[in-house]
Image (spheres, rainbow, N blue to C red):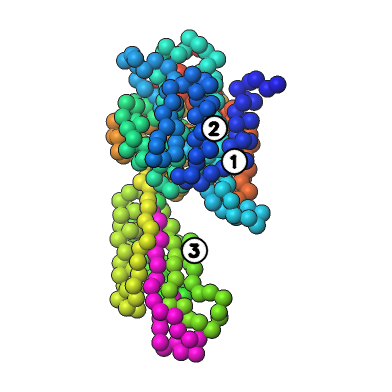
Amino acid sequence: MKHTTQDKVLDTFHYLHEHAEISWEETETTKYIEDLLIKSGCRVTTFEDCTGVIGEFGNFDSNLPVVAIRADIDALWQEVNGTFKANHSCGHDAHMSMVLGVLWKLEQFPNLKEKVAIKFIFQPAEEKGAGALKMVEKHVVDNVDYLFGVHLRPVQETAMGRATPVIVHGATHMFGVTIKGEDAHGARPHLNHNAIEIGTEIVNMLSKIHLDPRVPYSVKMTNFHAGGKSTNIIPGSASFALDMRAQDNETMKALETRVTDVFNSIRNLYNVDLEITEESGIAAAKTNEEAIDIMKSAIKDTLGEDNVDPPLVTPGGDDFHFYTIERPSLKATMLGLGCDLKPGLHHPYMTFDKDALKNGVDILFQAILTTYRIKQ
């Protein structure tokens, strides 16, 4: 029978990987984690109107600072082996397992329970960019002083056995848009505006957006749906989505303005109804030097000084940063963990070296000790 923390973390990872659930539908994941938190003696909070679960471990009746560790719990919806399914291709199954591993490691040192106040945040809907804001709305971080997160990193960014104390994510924005027009007979193209041609014009106009080249940014169409089985109908309606990225929040605002200008130009040029049906976004990272120093020290004590990477700047986004934007007093950082992740995040067949799970647990555990200045 397996008893070690490392074995429990690996078993938990395999279970969560096989039972993935998409954003706001993580009901079984929430229940599974809730049961594990209760078994470890945590005071547990769940919510009637959303998924997610909070566990509190330690001494919350003292003046100790509160340290929170956040794990995202949702999976992506994508095609795997010809079937669309919930799939943990962003590593959230690993994040949950490592954070639970920190709790189990704390249990191995009974003397720590009176010296720490740890809040474990298992947050839903990170992939929708909305889960962190919901947790803020639920006052989850109102009493939190330090907040740590963790994310697996692709091999191109961070090598196995190495880690970075901060991930400097960029801002993201998404538009879901519908082109509303009338269909026409294939022999009478003068009677409507072809929605596919309108989509092509939008792509061409987006490619002509030019902002300050010193700040990375991009905008691209990521899906487009028009027409049906009848090939002799010119579609007047279509739907599409845009994915936008910028390394800082100011550039994202400028990019949003330019994209909105494109939409207005298309409306005027084709006299067509262009309706924004969905819109969401994630802010760029706001970093905190004290939290970064704590995580850097934890990496050095765990992996060695030679395996501490510099800050990682990435165009990827994470709603983790809404916590600090909404609660500026929070001292927060996200650990970037090297794990030989290939071919890349969000790839349907993403894999990584499971030995890295132990590194993640040990670094986060050490970050707790460092925060409280506890020697073990």
| Residue picked out by circle 3 | 223
Residue type at mark 1 is His
Q: Could you classify mark 1 by the number of other residues whose Cα lies within 10 Å: few (under 14), some (14-19), or many (20 or more)?
A: some
Nearest to viewer (mark 3 / mark 2):
2
Is residue 1 located in the magenta-colored stretch of the structure?
A: no
| Residue picked out by circle 1 | 19
Q: Could you classify mark 2 by the number of other residues whose Cα lies within 10 Å: few (under 14), some (14-19), or many (20 or more)?
A: some
Spatial CA span between label 1 and label 2? 10 Å
Residues at badges 1 and 2 in contact (C-beta under 8 Å)? yes
Q: Position of residue 99 (x, y in %)?
A: 51, 29
Q: Position of residue 158 (x, y in %)?
A: 55, 39
Residue type at mark 2 is Tyr
Q: Position of residue 19 (x, y in %)?
A: 59, 40
Which image quarter is the N terminus in?
A: top right
| Residue picked out by circle 2 | 32
In the displayed structure, 115 sits above or below 157; it is above
Q: Earlier in the sequence, mark 3 or mark 1?
A: 1
* Picture disc at residue 163: none
| Region in magenta | 173-195
Residue type at mark 3 is Asn
Question: Which residue is most to the front?
Answer: 48
- Name the secondary structure under disc 1: loop
Q: Residue at x 40, y 51 (%)?
A: 172
Is residue 192 located in the magenta-colored stretch of the structure?
A: yes
